[in-house]
Amino acid sequence: MMRVIRFFLLVLLALAPLCGAAHAADDFQTLLAQLASDDFDAKAAAIRALGALGDPRAVRVLEALSSDGLYTTSDHKVVIAVESGDGYALTDPIDGKSLGTVTSDAVDQVMVNNSLRSDVESALAGLMLFSPRREDRQRAANDALKHPAPGRIPGLKKALAAEQDDEVRGTLRKALAAAQLSSTDKSEQLAAIATLSDSTSPEIYNLLAERRNASNLDPAVEKALDAELHAIAQRIRIIGFAATLFEGLSLGSILLLAAIGLAITFGVMGVINMAHGEMIMLGAYATYVVQQLFGAFLPPQWLDAYLVAAVPVAFVVTALVGVALERGIIRFLYGRPLETLLATWGVSLVLQQLVRTIFGAPNKEVGNPAWMTGGISLPGGVFLTWNRLVIMAFCFVVLGLLALVLRRTRFGLHMRAVTQNRDMAAAMGIPTARVDALTFGLGSGIAGIAGVALSQIGNVSPNLGGIYIVDSFMVVVFGGVGSLLGTLAGAMTLGIVNKLLEPVAGAVLGKVVVLVAIILFIQKRPRGLFALKGRVAES
Amino acid sequence: MRLRNIAKALVLAGTVLGTAPFAPAQADDVIKIGVLHSLSGTMAISESTLKDTVLMMVDDLNKHGGLLGKKVEAVVVDPASNWPLFAEKARELLEKDKVAVVFGCWTSVSRKSVLPVFEELNGLLFYPVQYEGEESSNNVFYTGAAPNQQAIPAVEYLMSKEGGEAKRWVLEGTDYVYPRTTNKILRAFLHSKGVSDADIMENYTPFGFSDWQTEVAAIKKFASAGKKTAVVSTINGDANVPFYKELANQGVKATDIPVVAFSVGEQELSGIDTKNLVGHLAAWNYFESVKNPTNAAFIKQWHTFIKDDKRVTNDPMEATYIGFKMWTQAVLQAGTTDVDAVRQAMYGQTVKAPSGFTVVMNTNHHLSKPVMIGEIRPDGQFDVVWKTKRTIKADAWSPYLAEDKGKVADWTFPWVCGNCTEPKYKAYAN
């Protein structure tokens, strides 16, 4: 019975704004108190009623509610609270006055869950169609497009008339058309379909398809809908293919980053380095340490720059480990590939356990800096994330720099000389032992840089290296041992093929198919895509 | 006189020290328990914490005088995330170290690997992790959730008005026995609620999968069909971090497409930046954020033992706590660590759990536990948005699967069976 009465009260409250502005203040306060209720339905109703109230103070309250900033005090007063020091700074939502600071036990958070949060979103969207801020209006227009309802038509028409910004106008016009689709007037329907005609979004496709399935449509409308649906489906297919290509290139760039270091240690020097993955892992942990140091010693506005600082740090750390590894173990094993394989595998286990002992087994959190979070939304529901775009660019920069070092520097010349003919290089006075150590250091350092990039998309855990070692060898072998260009081509091909197969065969089967295809390819061309030619390659 | 006092003191000290590490070889004075959790390899992330939990409980027990007047000693082995090695180490614990009980395993495949060993040697295993059910061994006590204590209530919540009335379902999982079985049960359950196959998308990825672009894009596409969509994730281990990162970066918000996970808890979130994941859900029987005196004491005990106030507690830790407490109670009640006697004493054993509820061990070797749904908070903890009013009894066999029809797990007379459609001692029963 109580619930029924309360529901009636709420309905009355929701209708109250129609009765005149004088009551609005009281309604606002009652609804505010209702927000703190334990009853889910009452809360939801209060949110909707607040949205319909048209009171600017409601925006503040709803925003606080959705960001967990609405609290109740011990005397059941609803307040907006912001954490400050050990306690909370309180603000009165009714008049916006400060209510001082209290300890955290003195206030209780007003709980919201997903479904309430989405209620708040649509309530805010209704209020924000007329907000002075452009992004608020854009958000509100997007929301209206997502949830078209005939009830929204008058509001949208009013907003469209007042709107100056072109982009917001475009969205509003579409939202209005989407709401008018189910209109009873034939010409209005046709106009709505025409407005939506240049669309590429799957949402609008589904909206039109749903409309198409409705009974007793006018033949002209039916024809327009059919043509429209066909055109949109065509566009979505093309965009979808482009998106798959992007995903493939992105995966390829990650494979490439992981494999470049190996292309040097394995490809150029011929060392089967099973500890390559652990160099990537060390680079990722170096990133983590740099992040922690930035957090501890530098002002917060510098924190986002940690990633840039981590690149040289990771390079130096892993290069040093690489040089130590070469001088300490690998140099005694040149020409004995099986023993090298076993020794480096042992080293990889030691490094893993070392990191586990120092940092602990759980994953470490490496945050994306703000400039790498989110992404750009393209038409057709395609979303390019910043972290992948940055990693792609970064990967090509690293590859370019490496090519420069190899082709244009004295060290690069020595390196190539030692690779091609060790004895002759030594006879020419090149310190081959030092070149070996530096080459291995360079390869390891680049693996470390890869670790910096990979920490942005995956886990930072002691097992990080294991994930990439097989893929790295696959890329280098497939692309052709000893060829940087081959590594590039190999990585991109594998990335794209993987992504083309994934939707068809599933991620598990896709990987199997790729592996089998590579084995068959290697049977046909044992030296990979870009085989080195000439006497060197034969020896 | 004084000399006699000194002698007395010496004798006394001797008896006290007799149980201490000076004489670990004397098997009569110690009760050995085995800890079989991976301390290296992929599962070390989750399992090493459970090893510490058992050690914490042992430490606490010894501080309070041990068990049956004896000191308890933990024998820790490392099966290294290697499934066959689990069986080898289990045999070593039971045959060589002669442990009274083993606390261990995380993945279902490791449990399946040790099961024949425990049955052959009549050992006792406490398994503390939520799993797919479809099992009830006389030698295992399952203190984690069965599907009806986690997966089914989570889906029911998302179907409810409060949970957002989801109509379309994405079942996203890692490719092995737990996700596949759970999703089979969920699909049968969704059918029983009138959801058609067109509204269910099922997808699997390998362990440690890291490139989620295609999968997340596919989820977004599936969700654009107009009906409210929810994702049920049985993704396990490391693969969760890149999955959630991709979700956040592609702007999938919990208000649009909520993701409910069964293997993501406080421990897993401590490796992720959770600011963009607020509102995504997890279903467990315990959350660290639950407020009650038992939980406060549990968290304090953990922080004191591990000497780090930042370490979180989670559901499998609570399940380990419950299992350990129940075992000590059963040993006290039986007056011995003999497996058969302890097993009989286990049935009906109750523990006041950190979840705030009193949990009971049933004759199907599973617990009655509460179910809670939590939403991720910006600080990596969970807000409990829904929980059962009382504890729910675990079903070892799912009532939603046709092949499980009529199967009963009950290890007391007249059934005495974990997988039967008829009581073993039917002739004697009435």
Image (spheres, rainbow, N blue to C red):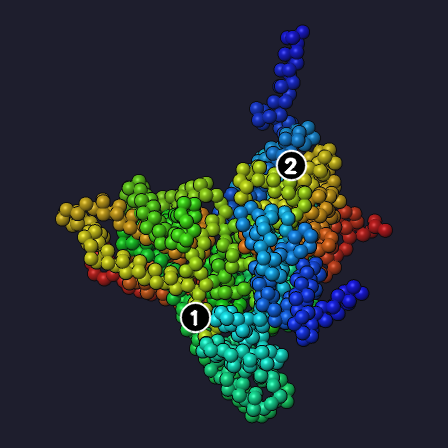
Q: Inspect the image, locate mark 1, and give the three-letter code of the amino acid beneath it.
A: Thr
Image quarter where the N terminus of chain B lies is: top right
Residue at 63%, 45% (x, y): give it.
Answer: B318
Q: Amino acid at mark 2?
A: Ala
Q: Identify the residue shown where x is 54% and y is 73%.
A: A129
Q: Which residue is mark 1?
A: A244
Q: Is residue B46 visible?
A: no
Q: Position of residue A475 (x, y in %)?
A: 36, 60
Query: Residue farthest to the right?
Result: B430
Whole-angstrom CA distance, mark 2 to mark 1, is: 56 Å
Of residues B319 and A291, which is closer to you in this image? A291
Name the residue at the bottom extreme. A219
> Total of numbered circles in the picture?
2
Task: Work out whether disc 2 and disc 1 sit on a shared chain.
Answer: no
How far from the left and from the top, in percent, is residue A126? 58, 72
For label 2, the residue is B100
Output the chain of dot 2: B
Q: Nearer the viewer, residue B106 or B297?
A: B297
Q: Which mark is residue A503?
A: none
Give the answer, above or below, for where A478 lies relative to A222.
above
Element under label 1?
Answer: helix
| Residue mark closest to the camera, 2 vs 1 | 1
Q: Nearer the viewer, residue B252 or A55?
A: A55
Q: Is residue A93 left or right of residue A240?
A: right
Image vertical order of residue A474 relative to residue B363, above or below = below
Q: Classify residue B38 as left or right of residue B401.
A: left
Please tell me in which quadrant of the rendered image residue B18 appears. top right
Res. A387 visible in picture: yes
Residue A431, given in percent of the width and then of the height, sits at 19, 45
